[in-house]
Image: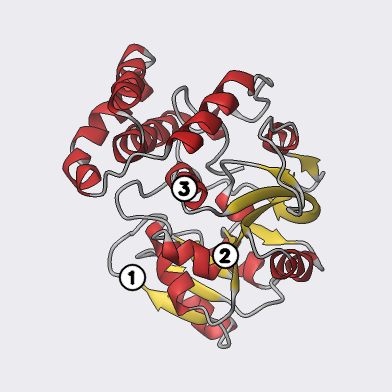
Amino acid sequence: MVVVSQNRRDELLASLARHRAPVVYVDNASTDGSADAVKERFPHVEAVRLRRNAGAYARTIGARRARTPFVAFADDDSWWAPGALAAGAATLADHSRLGLLNARILVGPEARADSVCEVMARSPLPREPGVPGVPILGFVACAAMVRREAFLAVGGFDPVVRFPGEEERLAIDLAAGGWAMSYVDDVVVHHHPSPVRDSPERRVRAMTRAGVLTGVMRLPWPDAVDRFRRALRAGPAERSGALDALRDVPAALRTRRPAPAEVLRQLDLLSATTDLPDRRPADERVPAGASSYGGDA
């Protein structure tokens, strides 16, 4: 398990108590004593303290520390259900083409199925013989298990996109690298959203920034420019996110590698057919122009 957290000490301690696998905990420069509390309460957990908040890139740091062929990610307010880690690892072990699987996400004490899972279950992407589950080209990081070899081969999560919205670029690169990704309904992750969260406006702003930068890194120029323009024409939060992205465009350009035509066709297919209503709270929705699914569940 790789768990990343910043300044959510109570949720972190509660979730770590539920994990039943070796854990690498990466502290994203917390100031609330999280790292010290983990060291005291869970001395068996391998803790990595970062001096600066690295965003989602902290998961890559954690995965590099892992010594297992498969790595599951969890946030400080999520955990894998009993038996889910073993089931996910067995699925990856039995199917060498599978680079990532996304579990079914049950939200809150009522265990409500997250609507993003309904979107994934209805994916229009063509199924590959011998690959289990439903084919996807996007995922939710806190419910993902990856083949460590595949994850690191494509660079893992990067320091440019950061968080939230970090999943889209990684999914594109896994697909471009020839790895399959699947939604597997019988593997379960629980997510109890922390009350310590950014405002809806700040979250939309950050998601829009990530979408614009991912466009610069992986989409053809007309599509990347269109994504930027659409954000500018949207609400104030999206407009601010697009302008935020401009500061990091030079870094994005240094890693620009447009996706292959087949991956772009799959993205177009998803964009044209993902029409389910988004019933998640406003601060958890994906803004227009970003990946069809991704971010916190």
Q: Which residue is mark 2?
A: 12
Q: Please name the residue that numbered disc 3 is placed on.
A: 176
The residue lying toward the viewer, choosing from 138 and 40, is 138
Read off the residue under disc 1: 50
Using the image, tell me which numbered label, if any, was put on residue 136: none
Q: Amino acid at mark 2?
A: Leu
> Picture coordinates of residue 240 (x, y %)?
29, 26
Label 2 crowd bin: few (<14), some (14–19), many (20+), radius 10 Å: many
- Residue visible at 46% across and 71% down in the picture: 62
The x and y percentages for residue 291 are 50, 33
Rendered residue at 47%/54% (across/down)? 177
Q: Can residue 54 be seen at all in this image of the molecule?
A: yes
Q: How many angstroms separate mark 1 from mark 2 (CA)?
A: 16 Å
Q: Residue furthest top?
A: 233
| Element type at mark 2 | helix
Secondary structure beneath dot 1 equals loop
How much space separates mark 2 and mark 3, taking CA atoms? Answer: 34 Å
The correct choice, above or below, for 85 with respect to 208 in the image is below
Q: Secondary structure at mark 3?
A: helix
Hey, which quadrant is residue 270 in on the image?
top right
Number of the front mark, 2 or 3:
3
Say which label, 1 or 2, has the lower sequence index: 2
Q: Is residue 213 left or right of residue 283?
A: left
Q: Measure how far apart labels 3 and 1 are at the Cα level.
A: 31 Å
Closer-to-camera residue (177/85) = 177
Q: Amino acid at mark 3?
A: Ala
Residue 111 lies, in percent from the top left, at 81, 46
Q: Is residue 107 visible?
A: no
Q: Quadrant of the C terminus?
A: top right
Relative to the observer, which residue lies in front, 221 or 234? 221
